[in-house]
Each structure stands twice: as structure tokens, then as C-alpha cells.
Amino acid sequence: MATGGGYRNGSHKAPNLRNSSSFKSKLPPSNVRRSSPATLGGGAPSGRVRVAVRLRPQNAEELEADADFADCIELQPELKRLKLRKNNWDSDTYEFDEVFTEFASQKRVYEVVAKPVVESVLDGYNGTVMAYGQTGTGKTYTLGRLGDEDTSARGIMVRSMEDLLAKISPETDSISLSYLQIYMETIQDLLNPVNDNISIVEDQKTGDVSLPGATVMEIRDQQSFIELLRVGEDHRFAANTKLNTESSRSHALLMVHVKRSISDGDNDFSPENRSLLIANLRPPMLRKGKLIVVDLAGSERIHKSGSEGHMLEEAKSINLSLSALGKCINALAENSSHVPVRDSKLTRLLKDSFGGTSRTSLIVTIGPSPRHRGETASTILFGQRAMKVENMLKIKE
Ligand code: ADP
Ligand code: MG
């Protein structure tokens, strides 16, 4: 994986956008969202999907190609605001739960976006972290970087596992995972590429989604986890080479199951409780949490349906999962009576991320280039709509 060595350390503010008084805010004052300062949520899962935006640093190619253009993005991280320039005079202002400039560290992004989700999973809830954005804006960097050459560059997957491993008791608890890719509405097993026998099953009573047939590997230490991610990445690359496509066209999903055996009164160190525990009068409870980390296909695919033949089929089915996700988010944001989760494999798999007691964080990634202003604007709008999704809603199909 390439390092961030080719990026300039410049300011993220366009000089001609500095005078904030010249901007029109999209949000009426009553609509201004106050978000928690430290992390995207905390405690028991409730409320809406938390959304952060992250700007990728300018790369060497952009440094040259965009030299004559004015920047189109201004970030105000202290206000959690992003301004996107419309023209020389006007810009739109958007608020997020968190705004990460190009200087934000991987550690901070993890702590704000993913750590509260990981904590909920340890408490037995479902948690989802998703990255959405145009190809090349840093989704895989944010989620999937292994960081073996530089541990400070490690992404959300590796940091989540590190926290999970640190918190569980190896004697009584277990962590296992599956690693999958969805390409053209087919689920591929990234841990066993010859396996084509994966189905999506939903428990009628609990609504829990599971994937019988997918390879499940138990994780005992960080090293074996990193090895598995590497195996998955190799298989993803091989599968995509065989199909003559790129990873930007598929969705990658890491599903981590955490089972913990919690004794009632685990934190009660009184002599009476100890003797009850020793006498086995308080049987341990099983807590099952599921963490899904989703590296979505490049969002630009949603617009590319003008192709022919295989390309058209591909564009349509990539559109299918991504646009189904967009439709579900819209329906949930509008509290609609029908949420079309059945329309695609991706939304079926994510069904329990958007309903019941689940905590979901979305990070939308954008690049600095004014040449991609249109894609950047549509990514920002996707993130804005997701901010309205209330997770406690029971999904009605
Ligand atoms: P995507 O998965 O969205 O297509 P990548 O994660 O592959 O994008 O990022 C594209 C390129 O930009 C890669 O070379 C990656 O290392 C680099 N990059 C992305 N985000 C950052 C960042 N925050 N800091 C430094 N380099 C980054
Ligand atoms: Mg990627």
C-alpha cells in the first residue's frame, strides 16, 4: 500500500473563502445540530447514525493539476462545519458530527468514529462502521490500512480488533470473523475464494442477519488477524483480476462476532457476591455483539450507467447495492413506512445495522480537487441524509 508521503502539508482553507460572513448557511439556526464533543456517541446505542466527513490531503498529481484553481472546500473543524463553494461569491455550509481535516490522525479518526461502536459491540449490541465516497478519497486508507511499516497509520479494522482483544477474557470469550466482498450482487468469501455457497438468512424472531456458508475464523491475537486481512486482500485482488475489475467496484465487509460470558455482578467485589459466584449460583450470561466494517464501492459508480454490455450490467448491479443503500437511508431519514432493505444484498446484510439496538457510524471521504466538485457535493449530501437516520426505528419493509 502506498504511503501518504506524496502529500503536501498545506492549509485546507481557500484564501478567498476566509471571510465567513460572506457565506449563506444552508441550515436555519433552529436546525443547527449540537453534537457530542469527544466521540460520535457513547453508552448504550440509541439515536441516529453518526456521520463524520474526512478530507484527504492533496496528492502530488493534484498539486500540479489544480494549481490554477481556487480551492472549493473550507473546513471549520471546531464548528464541525464544511463549506463547499458554489461560485466565486457563494457557498453552502453543512454540519456534521465531526469534520476531519487532512491533518487528522488515524488514531483520532478511530477514537471518534469507531471506538464507541466497538464499545457497544463489547456490550452485546450490533455495531457498524461504513466508509462512503468517491474512489481515491481514502475509504480503504481509513478502514483497512494494516500499517505494518508504520503503526500510527493503522486503520479502523486493525485498531478495532486491538481494542476488542484487549477487553475480552480469552478463557471465556471468543472473537470470530468472516470477510466478504459483494460484487455484482454476488457474495464472495474473501477467506476462501472457491466457496460460492453463501446465503443471507434472517432469524424470524430476533431479526438477526447471519451468513451460513461463509468461512468463520477465530481470532486469538492481533498478528493472526492482520494475516487474515492480508489473505483477504490478496483474494480480493485475485478475484478482481480474474473478473477483470477493480476493488473500487465491489463492497468489502468485515463481520466480527464477539461472544462474552458475563457474570451477573462481575463488578461487584463484595464477599457475598464472591461466594455466590464461587458457588455458581449466578450463572454467566452470554453477550453476543457483531461489528461490521464496510468499505463501500466508489460512490461515482452510482452515476456511471451510460455503459454497454457487461459494463452496463456491472454499473447497474453496483448501482443496485449502492443506490439501494441510498434509498434505505432516505426512507429511514424520512421515517417512511417502507424501507426497501430487500432490494440488494448489501442492504439485506446491513438490515440489522439500521434497526433495533444498533450503533452505526458513517465516515464520508472527500478529496480536495475542485475538478471533482460534483462528486464531492453528492458525497456530502449522502452524509447529510444519513445524519437523519434514527437507529432505534423498527424497520418496516
Ligand atoms: P479509496 O479506498 O477511497 O479508493 P484509498 O484509501 O485507496 O481510496 O486512497 C487513495 C490514495 O490516497 C492512497 O494512496 C492512500 O494511501 C492515500 N490517502 C487516502 N487518505 C489519506 C490520508 N488521510 N492521508 C494520507 N494519504 C491518504
Ligand atoms: Mg478502496
Image (cartoon, helix red, strand yellow):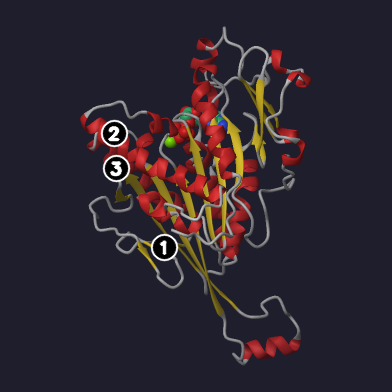
**Residue 230, position as x, y percentages in the image:** 39, 45
Res. 224 in view: no
The CA span between labels 1 and 2 is 28 Å
Res. 254 in view: yes
Residue behind label 1 places its C-beta within 8 angstroms of ligand 2: no
Residue behind label 2 places its C-beta within 8 angstroms of ligand 2: no
Q: Nearer the viewer, residue 336 or 165?
A: 336
Three-letter amino acid code at the position of disc 2: Thr
Q: Secondary structure at mark 2?
A: loop
Res 184 label: 3
Three-letter amino acid code at the position of disc 1: Val
Residue indicated by mark 1? 209
Quadrant for the N terminus, please: top left
Dot placed on the residue nearer the N-terminal end, 1 or 2 = 1
**Residue 346, position as x, y percentages in the image:** 39, 49
The CA span between labels 3 and 1 is 20 Å
Point out the quarter of the image occupied by ligand 2. top left
Res 361 label: none
Q: Is residue 132 left or right of residue 21?
A: left
Q: Is residue 97 above or below residue 340?
A: above
Q: Secondary structure at mark 1?
A: strand
**Mark 1 crowdedness (10 Å alpha carbons): few <14, some 14-19, many ≥20:** some
Dot placed on the residue nearer the N-terminal end, 2 or 3 = 3
Residue indicated by mark 2? 245
Three-letter amino acid code at the position of disc 3: Met
User: Residue at (70%, 17%) from the top-left corner?
Assistant: 17
Q: Secondary structure at mark 3?
A: loop
